[in-house]
Amino acid sequence: MKLSVVIAAYNERATLPQVLERAAAVPLEVEREIIVVDDCSTDGTREYLQQNTHLPNVRVIFHEQNRGKGAALRSGFAAATGDMVIVQDADLEYDPREYPKLVQPILEGRADVVYGSRFTGGDSHRVLYFWHSMGNKFLTLLSNMLTGLNLTDMETCHKVFRRGVLERVRLEEDRFGFEPEITAKVARLKVRIYEVGISYAGRTYEEGKKIGWRDGARAVWCILKYNLRRRSSAS
């Protein structure tokens, strides 16, 4: 088995080196590759990646204009060669050291998709924004009502897919609408979805957090759009 780690990076020069170090060092019994998609960063992230192309098992894709997280992930998924694909942010809110527990249900043949939940399990969480937490729970509830799933954290970054699952899905969202879109489309495939509890070290806006209320509004639209639209399971 082989794991592809896909990292969408935009202006994360301060944290990306540590993310890459952890993603490469975490003990796994499978081969791994790391694919970084720089989404036209302007803070030195791009230059760092250009100067460190020798990093082992790391491939870099450069977008010539900022296209958004969803577009960056599509580029990374298209380049992935692993049997499993995991989504990793370029900040340190989600820890690569969680990979062993995230991939275990797939390695054991029990799951096709695994979500890392910030709201279940006993792992540590940084205490931050109350309304962000309520917003995440509302979006997950709305998504669950339309997909029929019982997820606790639809908006989580840490998602693992068998590559064959991703190949059956045509992704469209360029920005943060990726999360509700992929959830709706994976649910329609009737594959085996598991959740595992993960740690979470959320950032403040002063520390670089990017998502805002407009992204929440877009997420509501995407939940409705991709769950109510009548197309084939691959659309």
Image (cartoon, rainbow, N blue to C red):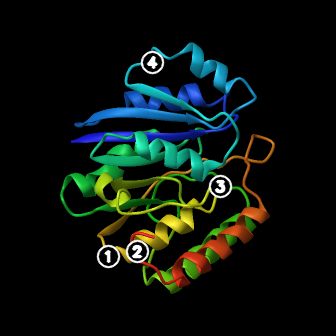
Query: Is residue 189 left or right of 91 when viewed as pictured?
Result: left
Q: Which residue is mark 2?
A: 187
How crowded pointer 2 is (Cα within 10 Å; few <14, some 14-19, many 20+) is rated as some
CA separation in Å, label 4 and label 1: 38 Å
* Location of residue 54 in the rendering, given as x and y in whole percent from the top left corner: 45, 14
Mark toward the start of the polypeptide (4 vs 3): 4
Q: Residue 96 or 46: which is nearer the viewer?
A: 46
Q: Is 234 situated left or right of 15 in this image? A: left
User: Can you identify the residue that label 1 sits on?
Assistant: 190
The one nearer the camera, 160 or 69, is: 69
> Judging from the image, what secondary structure is the residue with disc 4 in?
loop
Label 4 packing within 10 angstroms: few (<14), some (14-19), many (20+): some
Mark 3 and mark 4 in contact (Cβ < 8 Å)?
no
Q: Where, by quadrant of the figure, is residue 139 drawn?
A: bottom right
Q: Is residue 95 left or right of residue 213?
A: left
The quadrant in which the C terminus is found is bottom left
The residue carrying mark 4 is 55
Determine if residue 154 is in view.
no
C-alpha separation, residue under disc 3 versus residue under disc 2: 20 Å
